[in-house]
Amino acid sequence: MPNEGSYEAALARSNKIQEDLKVNPGAYTMLTGDRPTGRLHMGHYFGTIRERVRLQDMGVRTNIIIADYQVITDRDSTGNIADNVMNMVADYLACGIDPERTMVFCHSAVPAANQLMLPFLSLVTEAELLRNPTVKAEQEASGHALTGLLLTYPVHQACDILFCKGNIVPVGRDQLPHIELTRTIARRFNERFGKVFPTVDGLLTSTPLLPGLDGRKMSKSYGNAISLGMTADETAKLIRKSRTDGERTITFDPEGRPGVSALLTTAAVCTGRDEVEIADEIGDAGAGALKKLVTEAVNDYFAPIRARREELLADPGYLAEVLADGNRRANEQANATLDEVRAAMGMVYGA
Ligand code: TRP
């Protein structure tokens, strides 16, 4: 038996849940979310958004947090946060998130969820916070000093997950330490004060990470990401100027030919075909032909999503209503959970 905190153990539990979901979707509550620091891109879509829609359509209770307080973990300003939040709601709905079935809400609108931070902070030690590898990596990447909020944001994520009694969180392997911390917090709370919180598991996605157009990690700051909201022309332009290499024959070799291979993977995820098969088909026709194929594949795949996105953005009143309704439902759940927490802790006095 691998130890409970290992990757192998998490993967084994995740595989078991994937099986059980087929017969028992009603036993699961998913929570996940995004930081509203910019626009969602193809990496988000194929990495997680599509999975959220799948879980929603299976009958899992699904919750998506727009993590606005997480924007300031490692930066000084909130930027165009309101615009980012509304675009995010539009992106979700355009991709198939149904606001009737999925609760979409943001941190700053749900005070009782944030208040869980106080008891939860008492359940973790400084050493546990300091050894989180993701926090360290994010702090180094930001070039900022380690703020108190960055150090404690994994605890805040535990609040996000636990206020709505989430028990599954779709994650990549790098996010597992956060899930582990959430499990620890829930377990310690239940041991010390009485059972309020469920056991949380990461749902490890099997889809490999979609690289950016140059083969590096996909990121808006590298200019290698195709956002969902780009027009067909903007998409074509970004693909046209992506770097390939001097070799004419197209082959799939992610190590040796990162640019060409990233383009092949981009076409592959959009068409459901295999990279090697696409490479063989293009053969000596070269990078120009490859780029043409990728552009068509991306633009065909996202055309209906983009059209729906435009319609939604033309009706900001509707988007605001969707978010207000999600916030209202999140507050109901968070207030109920905080009441249970107070009762478990004996903090019920007077009215
Ligand atoms: N940190 C996540 C991201 O940047 C967003 C997020 C906030 C989240 N709270 C969460 C994800 C809770 C999973 C569970 O994308």
Image (cartoon, grey):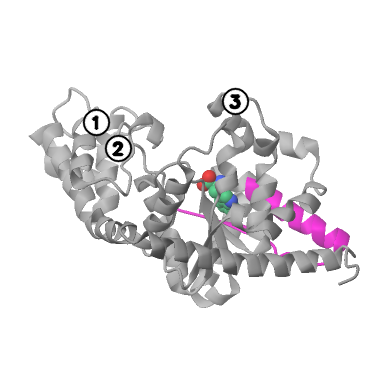
In the rendered view of the protein, which quadrant contains the N terminus?
A: bottom right
Q: Earlier in the sequence, mark 3 or mark 1?
A: 3
Q: Amino acid at mark 1?
A: Ser
Let me know if residue 203 is in the magenta part. Answer: yes
Question: Is residue 218 or residue 305 the one in the foreground?
Answer: 305
Q: Are marks 3 and 1 in contact (CB under 8 Å)?
A: no
The residue drawn where x is 78% and y is 58% is: 187
Question: Is residue 240 or residue 274 the one in the foreground?
Answer: 240
Q: CA distance from mark 2 to mark 3?
A: 31 Å
Question: Is residue 132 or residue 312 the one in the foreground?
Answer: 312
Q: Is residue 158 visible?
A: yes
- Which residue, given by chain and number where applicable, does mark 2 sit on? 262
The residue drawn where x is 88% and y is 63% is: 347
Q: Nearer the viewer, mark 2 or mark 3?
A: 3
Residue 5's x, y, as percent? 69, 49
Left or right of 96, for residue 184 = right
Mark number, residue 242: 1
- Which residue, given by chain and number where applicable, does mark 3 sit on? 144
Q: Amino acid at mark 2?
A: Ala
The residue drawn where x is 22% and y is 56% is: 303
Secondary structure of the residue carrying numbered label 3? loop
Q: Residues within 10 Å of mark 2 (few under 14, many from 20)?
A: many
Q: Amino acid at mark 3?
A: His
Quarter residue 287 falls in: top left
Q: Which residues are magenta?
A: 178-207
Let me know if residue 183 is in the magenta part. Answer: yes
Q: Are marks 2 and 3 in contact (CB under 8 Å)?
A: no
Q: Is residue 214 above or below residue 98?
A: above
Q: Is residue 192 above or below residue 282?
A: below
Q: Earlier in the sequence, mark 2 or mark 3?
A: 3
